[in-house]
Amino acid sequence: GAVVSQHPSRVICKSGTSVKIECRSLDFQATTMFWYRQFPKKSLMLMATSNEGSKATYEQGVEKDKFLINHASLTLSTLTVTSAHPEDSSFYICSASTVPGYTFGSGTRLTVV
Amino acid sequence: KQEVTQIPAALSVPEGENLVLNCSFTDSAIYNLQWFRQDPGKGLTSLLLIQSSQREQTSGRLNASLDKSSGRSTLYIAASQPGDSATYLCAVRPSSGSARQLTFGSGTQLTVLP
């Protein structure tokens, strides 16, 4: 079946630095990918929709300058958390549409210290 | 705006029991409904997907039903095992509009005791 590979699985960074998370579709082309954030014991919150070759669409309340999304190819989307702060610590998950359903990456645990 | 609710939020059962997880949604205009499993600190694994025209789907010990008109879905797990312990999430996809993203419920945390 369709596989979405997400890296890194865990990252610890210092406050003020930037972190890049990659999401790759391994055996299919994904024109659209979705980025979610998950707080402890909470459900997934959609942050943005990433479209290949165009600008991402951000959900209300998500800072596009802080969470930079790039979808330069049909198999790769990246999320960069810029100038990270402790409140950005969270679990980030990407997904791609694999008609008729969706396939999710394994997630990235970001800890900002 | 679509809202998805899952009850109960947490469930603990002894091994071998059959159990039912519930999911309800407010807007019946859905394209499909998908059940996922999430282990602690991990991503989501798709369990079952039910198209809006379908009533149920089965995979092994899992059976998911869908009553679109009443806005309900259930996930039935037969003969539960400790390995079934995880958080189960349901998510709906809208049938129309430019948005194709899923709306998730808050999940049911299942613990199966040996």
Image (cartoon, coloured by chain):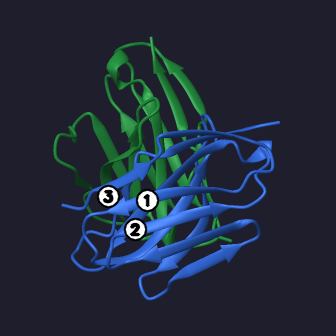
Chain colours: A green, B blue
Residue nearer the viewer, A18 or A9: A9
Left or right: residue A90 compared with residue B4: right
Assess disc 1: are there few (<14), some (14-19) or many (≥20) residues with their C-alpha within 10 Å of its C-alpha: many
Distance of mark 1 from mark 3, alpha carbons? 25 Å
Seen in the picture, residue B19 relative to B27 is either above or below; the reply is above
How would you rate the neighbour count of disc 3 (Cα within 10 Å): few for under 14, some for 14-19, many for 20 or more? many
In the image, B29 versus B101, the foreground residue is B29
Rendered residue at 33%/20% (across/down):
A87
Q: Which residue is mark 3?
A: A49
Residue beneath the point at 43% across and 59% down: B23
Identify the residue position indicated by label 1 in the image. Answer: B23
Q: Nearer the viewer, mark 1 or mark 3?
A: 1
Locate the C terminus of chain B and report the quarter of the image it occupies: top right
Which mark identifies residue A53? none
Q: Where A48 sits versus B72, above or below?
A: above
**x and y percent of residue A113 in the render?**
44, 11
Dots 2, 1 in contact, CB < 8 A: yes
Q: What is the secondary structure assignment of the residue under circle 3? A: strand
